[in-house]
Image (cartoon, rainbow, N blue to C red):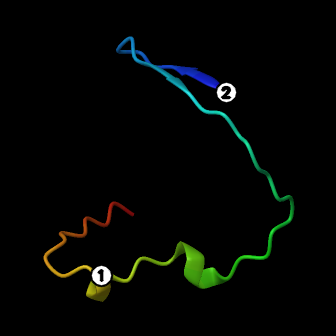
Amino acid sequence: MKMFEKNGNKVTYEITNFTPNAAVTEGTFTFDAKKYPGVEVVDLR
């Protein structure tokens, strides 16, 4: 995939491996700030 940004940057992604319908847990999408002390979390919800 080629991505062209408004500022002129060009990024190319090449997918070399793809697993459809992979099993993922809800925890995969949860950020645990306790694991990263000193990190500022900005919640823009």
Residue 38 location, quadrant: bottom left
Residue most extreme to the left: 38
Residue 34 location, quadrant: bottom left
Q: Residue at x 71, y 76 (%)?
A: 24
Q: Nearer the viewer, mark 1 or mark 2?
A: 2
For label 2, the residue is 1
Residue 44 at x, y percent in the picture: 33, 60
Q: Is residue 11 left or right of residue 25?
A: left
Residue 43 at x, y percent in the picture: 31, 66
Q: Residue at x 24, y 70 (%)?
A: 41
Name the amino acid type tagged 2.
Met
For label 1, the residue is 33
Circle 2: element type: loop
In the picture, which quadrant includes the C terminus? Answer: bottom left
Circle 1: element type: helix
Q: Is residue 14 left or right of residue 31?
A: right
32 vs 42, nearest the viewer: 32
Name the amino acid type tagged 1.
Ala
Residue 15 at x, y percent in the picture: 71, 40
Q: Residue at x 18, y 82 (%)?
A: 37
Residue 3 at x, y percent in the picture: 56, 23
